[in-house]
């Protein structure tokens, strides 16, 4: 069967860095608590003049420039985010205009932290018809955060990633196999309840930012995340008939270090095969896997012919895994990367 491949990667992290100590000045928390519970040391936070679309444009343009491709070659822009530019139109349309991607059809998707893998699965299907797709995973989570809620505010950061997906011609990262899932019976465990049609925003809570509150039952999310990510990784490896030790790298959604360690333990995979930079960027939702991939390629950690497995879990719940085969190193540019 025809396949598709990632032929270029762009990523963007804002220049402002906020440490755990910085947060401890505005809320009742500590560097020690955050590091111990999550592994996070700092996060990147968008500047006042930045928006989801501007960060996405930076990542997408980087992916085009590094591959010396023209935006006019794009057939689709699929942009995944939980923090859109505005309710309507789609953030992808703002990015299309900034890129001058005049031929591209542009649409947003929302999938929580598993959104990138879900969107990539759709891009794979489109690219197999001969089209070129820009997939963007992007979040500006710190702007719509309830800063009075220390249990969620410390977990997230901002960033944008973009990959160009094209019919497989033996270059870049082949999207070998993908399986994603959702379980809508669990929507109450992790949600941002206000602002949609179900719960219009109560005026009395706007003043203190309460309408941005993320309702999260942290321990349940933790348990489901570990179980679903490890189970889906096992399933996809069975599908492609690969033993766990044939995997060179796990490129997981960067939720927090304890989740990554627990998934590695469940799969009996040594931690030196599990990429993590959550200490620098925190949880960047839909962007996190692309930021991780871009960081790995810029650090020359991934070699041709290696096999990667990516796993993700997030609100919905939605989760899944993908197996990727590195055919050649894709051109990669990560703007704002921590050295
Ligand atoms: N600083 C200091 N104390 C805090 C903070 C904070 N930032 N946040 C909570 N606490 C306190 C709590 O109030 C509680 O105090 P109490 O015992 O006096 O009541 C205490 O710390 C323990 O709170 P718990 O919630 O039980 O702490 P836990 O060990 O479960 O860790 C955490 C919390 C880190 C959120 C954990 O449950 C977790 O990692 N869950 C997964 C959440 C996640 O990753 N969500 C992201 C979206 S989904 C995804 O990406 C997979």
Image: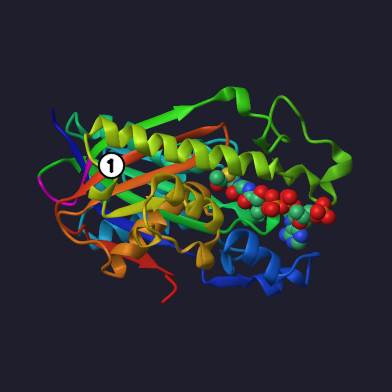
User: Which residue is nearer to you in this view: 338 or 219?
Assistant: 219
Whole-percent x and y of residue 335? 39, 68
Q: Nearer the viewer, residue 171 or 237?
A: 237
Name which quarter of the figure residue 46 lies in.
bottom right
| Residue 173 is inside the magenta segment | yes
Rendering quarter of residue 332: bottom left
Q: Is residue 272 visible?
A: yes
- The stretch in magenta equals 170-175
Give the image quarter of residue 283: bottom right
Density class for disc 1 (Cα within 10 Å; few <14, some 14-19, many ≥20) is many
Picture layout, residue 252 above or below residue 114: below
Q: State whether label 1 is within 8 Å of ligand 1.
A: no
| 209 or 258, nearer to the observer | 258
Quarter of the image with the N terminus in it:
top left
* x, y percent for residue 242: 22, 40
Furthest residue in direction top, as rendered: 185
Residue at image location 79% in from the left, 50% down from the top = 209
Residue drawn at point x = 64 percent, y = 59 percent: 37
> Observer-nearest residue: 323 or 112?
323
Instruction: Specify whether residue 80 is in view.
Output: no
Query: Taking 245 as reference, is 95 left or right?
Result: right
Q: Is residue 20 inside the magenta stretch? A: no
The structure residue drawn at horizontal position 78% and vertical position 68%, both measured from the top left corner, is 26
Q: Is residue 236 left or right of residue 329?
A: right
Q: Which residue is mark 1?
A: 323
Where residue 250 appears, as percent x and y from the top left, is 35, 52
Quadrant where the C terminus is found in the figure: bottom left
Q: Circle 1 sits in a helix, a strand or a loop, which is it?
A: strand
Q: Position of residue 287 (x, y in %)?
A: 46, 51
Farthest-out residue, right: 204
| Residue 231 higher or lower than 14, as above or below | above
Q: Residue furthest left?
A: 170
């Amino acid at each position: 069967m025809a396949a598709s491949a990632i032929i270029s990667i762009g990523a963007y992290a804002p220049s402002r860095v906020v440490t755990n100590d910085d947060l401890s000045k505005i809320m009742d928390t500590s560097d020690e608590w955050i590091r111990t519970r999550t592994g996070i040391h700092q996060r990147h936070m968008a500047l006042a003049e930045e928006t989801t679309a501007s960060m996405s444009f930076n990542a997408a343009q980087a992916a085009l420039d590094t591959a010396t491709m023209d935006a006019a070659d794009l057939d689709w822009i699929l942009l995944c985010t939980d923090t859109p530019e505005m309710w309507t139109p789609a953030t992808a349309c703002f990015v299309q205009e900034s890129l001058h991607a005049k031929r591209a059809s542009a649409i947003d998707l929302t999938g929580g932290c598993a959104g990138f893998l879900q969107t990539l699965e759709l891009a794979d299907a489109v690219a197999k018809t001969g089209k070129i797709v820009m997939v963007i995973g992007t979040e500006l989570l710190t702007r719509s955060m309830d800063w009075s809620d220390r249990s969620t505010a410390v977990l997230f950061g901002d960033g944008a990633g973009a990959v160009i997906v094209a019919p497989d011609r033996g270059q870049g990262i082949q999207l070998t196999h993908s399986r994603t899932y959702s379980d809508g019976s669990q929507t109450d465990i992790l949600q941002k309840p206000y602002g949609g049609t179900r719960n219009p925003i109560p005026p009395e809570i706007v003043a203190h930012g309460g309408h941005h509150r993320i309702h999260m039952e942290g321990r349940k999310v933790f348990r489901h995340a570990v179980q679903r990510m490890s189970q889906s990784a096992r399933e996809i490896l069975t599908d492609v008939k690969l033993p766990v030790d044939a995997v060179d790298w796990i490129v997981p959604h960067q939720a927090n270090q304890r989740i990554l360690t627990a998934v590695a333990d469940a799969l009996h995979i040594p931690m030196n095969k599990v990429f993590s930079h959550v200490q620098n960027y925190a949880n960047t939702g839909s962007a996190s896997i692309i930021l991780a991939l871009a960081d790995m390629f810029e650090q020359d950690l991934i070699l041709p012919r290696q096999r990667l497995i990516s796993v993700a879990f997030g609100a919905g719940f939605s989760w899944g895994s993908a197996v990727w085969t590195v055919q050649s190193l894709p051109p990669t540019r990560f703007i704002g990367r921590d050295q």
